[in-house]
Image: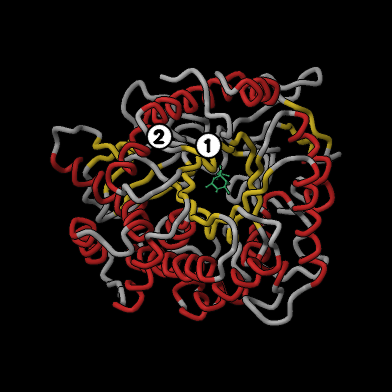
Amino acid sequence: TPQRFPDNFVFGGATAAYQVEGACQTHGKGKVAWDDYLAQQGRFSPEPACDFYNRYDSDLELCERFGMNGIRVSIAWSRIFPNGGVGEPNPEGIAFYHNLFASCRARGVEPYVTLHHFDSPAALYANGDFLNRDTIDAFEAYARFCFDEYPEVTRWFTFNEIAAATLNRYVEGTWPQGKKGCLHECLQAQHNMMLAHARAVLAYKQGGYPGTIGVIHALEYKYPYDPACPGDVQAAKNDDVLQNRLLLDATFRGDYAPDTLQIIDHLCQASNGSVEFLDDDLSIMRRAAQLNDCLGINYYQSRFLKAFDGETDLHHNGTGDKGTGRWRVAGVGERAVRPGVPTTDWDWIIYPKGLFDLMMDISLCYPNYKQLFITENGMGRKDQLVDGTVDDSERIAYVEDHLRWILKAIECGVDVGGYFMWSLQDQFSWTNGYNKRYGFFYVDFETQQRTPKASAYWFKRVAQTKRL
Ligand code: BGP
């Protein structure tokens, strides 16, 4: 394994507009589906999160001080177009992101900008979101607007985690107006979002903008629980198509391999529905598939699948009560944990080698991938501030183990451009609220004071020396 990361390797922290900014319904911002949903639930509020809307400059100063040369941020679509999709733009929202990017430049921290991080404007979301083709048109128009408006950005990603956006909404039911077990809608929405991605990529390339563009997928390696059991092997393949393979095929082939299509058919039958992939759409996607400059991988865990033929039975552990999560989906399988494999309090499986296996799989199956970024990786913890510091050595070990596997992939010839830990500072978590902390910087949500955790000091040394 090489001892050092490449000289131009990016070390940074990740954020998402809705999870950090606050100012959700002020300064001209339009609603997103989460606003009413969270208010009705009454469990926790996205307001003011970590008040990034007002504190971005001091957070970027922290990035600079802690040796980071990159940051992931997202643009809130409804801050730019409050009325849903397109229409009259909001000058205050537009100016906010110019100021944010200027602050990034001033601190020497390269912004990696995502156009859509789970926050479709409410009106579009209510009308079917990406199952409605009007949303695809609106997304392309919004993307074109941003490419023109923000020439200071040269690192674009279209979507963050299409898998999470569709699985949580149509299969697991943990997101606004969520449904359970509706596999065909999940797959159709994935395809439609990949078409929207492809159209944005073509617009970017046809526009001749001097930068890079890609998409970010939440990938999990799907292992059979028992590789000798054919039912487990099949369950792993099903879950792979549901979460990874449709999206990777769409990204790098622009259509679906026969094996992928076969499982898509099986999943649709299991939920008594169908999907439609139009030839014209596939030809757009095939053209775009050769033009992606990079792929962002968000990696937290992998899965061990068992055969399962009962009714769908799910419980989302959104409280940190270890051992309460269940994931059994009719037509797919059951996610289990192999003995001896550690998990977090939210039942996320800690399995760093899965990231290596994924990177190798991508470089073999999709040799046109060009470059990978690890755009999220990190550990949710119930961090405690004790005597002005946070001992998160567990998180350090988690990140270090993943970085070691990234070095190994680089040694095997995989092109990896950078690593962003989720998250830069403690933030609002969609279905877990505020006690699941991920940041380098501890946030006291009452006072908004930031305190660097042990991991921040550790990461600074790694970023500066490019060594573990
Ligand atoms: C990813 C998302 C992030 C973030 C992270 C942690 O799926 O891109 O937005 O939330 O996961 O997830 P959670 O907050 O559910 O623990």
Query: In x, y percent, where is residue 329?
Result: 31, 52
Q: Residue 405 carries which label?
A: none
Q: In this view, does 406 lie above or below 329?
A: above
Query: In x, y percent, where is residue 417?
Result: 51, 39
Depth check: give the residue in front, 201 or 375: 201
Q: Earlier in the sequence, mark 1 or mark 2?
A: 2
Residue at the spot of label 1: 377
Q: Is residue 383 left or right of residue 341?
A: right
Residue count near mark 2 (Cα–Cα under 10 Å), binned few <14, some 14–19, many ≥20: many
Q: Could you tell me which residue is drawn at 49 percent across and 17 percent down?
A: 3
Residue 411 in which image quadrant: top left
Image quarter where the N terminus lies is top left
Q: Could you tell me which residue is drawn at 27 percent across and 55 percent down?
A: 330
Residue 43 seen by the camera:
no
Depth check: give the residue in front, 416 or 374: 416
Residue at the spot of label 2: 355
Residue 363 in which image quadrant: top left
Asked whether the residues under the numbered discs 1 and 2 touch, taking CB atoms below 8 Å apart as contact, a structural biologist would say: yes
